[in-house]
Image (tube, rainbow, N blue to C red):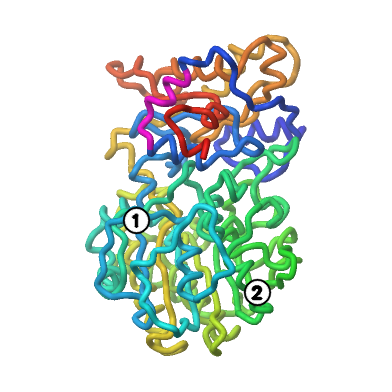
Amino acid sequence: MTPKRLLLLSLALGVLVTSAVTVPRGPARAQTGDEDLVALACSVPHEFLLRTWRGWRPDRGAQLSYIPREPDFVGSGLPHVGPWGYVQDVPMLWYGPGSVFAGRSVKRPVTLAGIAPTVAKLLHFDGFKAIDGRPMLEAIKPTKREPKLVVTLVWDAGGMNVLDAWPDAHPYLDSLISEGTWYQDATVGSSPTSTAQDHATIGTGAFPNHSGITGHHLIVGDRLTSPWNEGPAFLIEPTFADVYDRAMNNEPVVGIVGTVDIHFGMLGHGAFFTGGDRDIALTRSVVGGTTLTDEGFEWNLPPREAGYYKLAKYANDVPGFEEDVRRVDQADGKLDGMWRDNSIDQLLKGFDTPARTPYQERVVETVIQREGFGKDDVPDLLYLNFKEIDYVSHVWSMNSLEMRDAVVAQDLALKRFVNFLNQQVGENRWVMVLTADHGAMPDPAVSGGFQINTPPIQAGINEHFDTDGDDTPVVELVQPSQVFLNVDELEQNGFTVGDVARYVMTLTQAQTAGPNEAVDPATANDTVFQAAFPSALMQDLPCLPEAAA
């Protein structure tokens, strides 16, 4: 089977392949006569349009962008992708009594792009300038002493909608809010809201249109590929860690404990960066996996990253995971191999249950101790991603009792972590920012959202616009917020991206439902997209002056 056919098959099965695919493609350009599409794009709320533009760039992004009607969504597995508040709103807590103001609640809007420049200010480091982010100065005490360690902690998918859905599940986080600086209006800032690009925004202070990481699939040259398919090579902008570590002659201890390599965007390029060194990095990415988030059971570094980072192999020797699983098993009073109604053994032997969270917490503590984070007066940087909330959101939804369990486990780990840092690094000597890379998709039974399936979109576009009878399809890949098109093939058939956008706007629930999905007759003919337009239009929209700035 050819790589292209493998890609299309994986699309039909709802998985995201990581292999690179050669895609003959023409220019992703707007066409004259698209005035109706310009008007349609400008009918979108400005903030939605701005976020969409920030998430796209001409040389890497898809040719067609669309926004489903809220709360409808595209794709299986409850994807957390879009410009809407429920996936955009994230916690933003700065905590560190020696360096951060206590008891402050700030209403000023901020985004993930503001994290890197804020860390720079905390360390009194003037050598880093973020393209898009601005420092959150309201949080920073006027002191000459730098913290010995700055921790960037991401609760993957732990957006405000998750925290608000389970208000009693995170009492310790709530207690820290009163002791730190809390930003009430924090958002991702760009769309699509996916793991790879949002972590890159955290690290670089640049939105995807500048960082180059525009999604879990992107175009590089003539290839449709994935963002870490060749290690850190596709991350265009340096991260704060890249610049700071080199400026300090690589004396700081810099590292990440994540779950998959697409988290590495908040750390940086490691030794790939000129003058950089091999920063500490732990992931559980499966070598040769079929999706970007496939996880194995051991901490590792895929070969494509092994030359640029340093694996802390001892992490695999951290004990106690079996006991963590046992506690999850016994939470209902029975030791029966079940977490609620779910077989623990089928959930990666328990790693895809809340047992992963206390285990990973101990791994983090071990890395801090063994590598000497925060042990001297040269400030160190540690980046952390905890992923159980995200896993639960895709399998059971944010409204499930499994989600409550995940948030409770994360909150307990946070309490242990703060106590550990106070003992290991010293009270008032470290700073932590706690945030999320995006929110989670609500259960459609709760939100009323309609699942727009991708195979009908792909089949419909090919049927209407690929009429020349050759073996080259017009559609390369359908994603939750965009479609990659072979523009050369499209134009060979006598059509434009604008023609495809107009067709997509006609699609209804009945036309985009899954093969076994019953559609309410009352809404079967309702269209499912709020807007669809050639992505290139965003560069010149009269209603989007930011694109021309």
Q: Is residue 547 left or right of residue 510?
A: right
Label 2: which secondary element: helix
Q: Is residue 37 left or right of residue 239?
A: left
Q: Position of residue 474 (x, y in %)?
A: 66, 21
Residue 491 in view = yes
Q: Position of residue 31 (x, y in %)?
A: 59, 17
Label 1: which secondary element: helix
The residue that label 1 is drawn on is 403
- Residue found 64% across the figure and 40% down from its top: 218
Q: How many marks?
A: 2
Q: Please say if 500 is above or below 90.
A: above
The quarter of the picture where residue 226 lies is top right
Q: Is residue 349 left or right of residue 335?
A: right
Q: Please say if 528 is above or below 191.
A: above
Amino acid type, label 2: Ala
Q: Is residue 297 left or right of residue 1?
A: left
The residue that label 2 is drawn on is 247
- Residue found 59% across the figure and 58% down from its top: 265
Q: What span is colored magenta in the figure?
A: 37-46
Q: Whole-Å distance between the Cαs marked 1 and 2?
A: 42 Å
Can you say which quadrant of the picture contains the N terminus?
top right
The answer to if 92 sits in the magenta stretch is no
- Residue found 41% across the figure and 64% down from its top: 354
Of residues 529 and 241, the one nearer the viewer is 241
Q: Position of residue 203 (x, y in %)?
A: 55, 61
